Image (cartoon, rainbow, N blue to C red):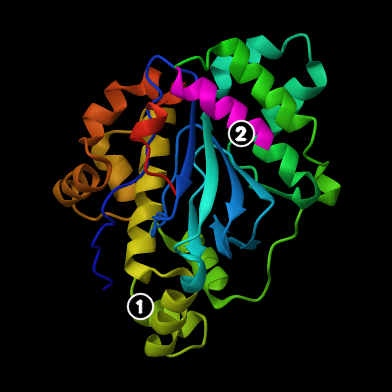
């Protein structure tokens, strides 16, 4: 049976009294799968690597923009030679709060609804030709964030500016194919509710255990058991927010045979017990942003 050591933390953003957070960060990428309850926009200014979003892999390079819908598992793998120069702008948005500010712009409002729809794929586009303009845009809004001036109106104008530049779905970046880790992730998606063993996974994918573990770690920088644990906790969070199932039922549904172990694992990974998390349902469904200076995001 796979051990279930959890990653250090999961990035469950609480926007508090704001509707948006804005950060321009250097180096120090998140090195494990994580998710947010709000919409995330990542713009790569410098650095190369791979972005993994749910079961899909994308090449990361300067000028690319990534939009992760709420509850999308994602991870950034920065190439070692680029680790010290990795620079990105990250925006977290309470999409529910900002939608009314876009009433006069129905086309862009629909775009925000599509980008933030739960279960939809990450949006990836190449804005290399617009990089100087993006730098100017983010410098301006970074100054507003530093001055605590990113109110609803400024949040709306920032999103309108971004939406006016990102292309339609037909011209976005396609995922990279044929990675073994993608096969593992798809297998986990289909089997996370059951008792999982590395032997069963390796047999189903017709690979040896050692080869499978080594390749998954090489492609994602993570152990398979860590990914399984993160995936199960994400599913548990969704059920706590969206269902009336009991804590025991949810634990069993996402693959924890023992309710006590589920509660302990959830507390370690999320920072709250399942019951505490559920009691915060209203704020979690429409989260509002940690001050930008407090964020440590990938």
Say whether residue 55 is visible. Answer: no
Q: CA distance from mark 2 to mark 1?
A: 45 Å
Q: Secondary structure at mark 1?
A: helix
Q: Earlier in the sequence, mark 2 or mark 1?
A: 2
On screen, residue 215 versus residue 183, left or right, reads: left
Q: Where residue 219 appears, x then y in whole percent? A: 50, 74
Magenta extent? 136-147
Along the line of sight, the residue nearer the viewer: 213 or 49: 49
Q: How many marks?
A: 2
Q: Residue at x 26, y 36 (%)?
A: 247
On screen, residue 167 versus residue 55, left or right, reads: right
Numbered mark located on residue 138 in the image: 2
Q: Secondary structure at mark 2?
A: helix
Which residue position holds label 1?
A: 198
Is residue 144 on the magenta stretch?
yes
Q: Residue at x 64, y 43 (%)?
A: 120
């Amino acid at each position: 049976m796979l051990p279930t050591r959890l990653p250090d933390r999961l990035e469950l953003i609480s926007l508090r009294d704001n509707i948006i957070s804005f950060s321009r960060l250097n180096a120090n990428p998140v090195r494990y799968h994580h998710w947010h309850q709000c919409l995330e926009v990542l713009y790569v200014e410098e650095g190369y690597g791979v972005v993994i979003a749910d079961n899909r892999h994308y090449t990361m390079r300067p000028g690319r923009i990534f939009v992760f819908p709420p509850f999308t598992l994602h991870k950034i793998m920065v190439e070692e030679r680029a680790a010290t120069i990795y620079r990105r702008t990250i925006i977290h948005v309470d999409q529910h709060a900002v939608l009314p500010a876009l009433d006069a712009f129905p086309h862009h409002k629909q775009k925000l609804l599509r980008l933030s729809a739960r279960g939809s794929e990450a949006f990836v586009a190449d804005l290399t030709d617009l990089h100087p303009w993006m730098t100017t845009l983010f410098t301006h809004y970074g100054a507003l964030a530093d001055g605590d001036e990113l109110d609803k109106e400024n949040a709306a104008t920032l999103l309108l500016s971004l939406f006016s530049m990102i292309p339609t779905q037909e011209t976005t970046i396609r995922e990279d194919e044929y990675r073994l880790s993608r096969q593992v992730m798809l297998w986990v998606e289909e089997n996370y509710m059951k008792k999982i063993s590395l032997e069963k996974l390796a047999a189903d994918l017709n690979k040896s255990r050692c080869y499978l573990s080594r390749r998954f770690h090489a492609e994602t920088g993570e152990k398979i058991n860590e990914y399984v644990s993160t995936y199960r906790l994400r599913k548990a969070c969704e059920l706590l927010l969206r269902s009336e199932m009991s804590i025991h039922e949810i634990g069993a549904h996402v693959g924890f045979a023992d309710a006590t172990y589920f509660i302990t694992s959830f507390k370690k990974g999320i920072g709250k017990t399942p019951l505490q998390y559920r009691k915060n349902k209203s704020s979690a469904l429409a989260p509002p942003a940690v001050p930008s200076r407090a964020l440590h995001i990938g």
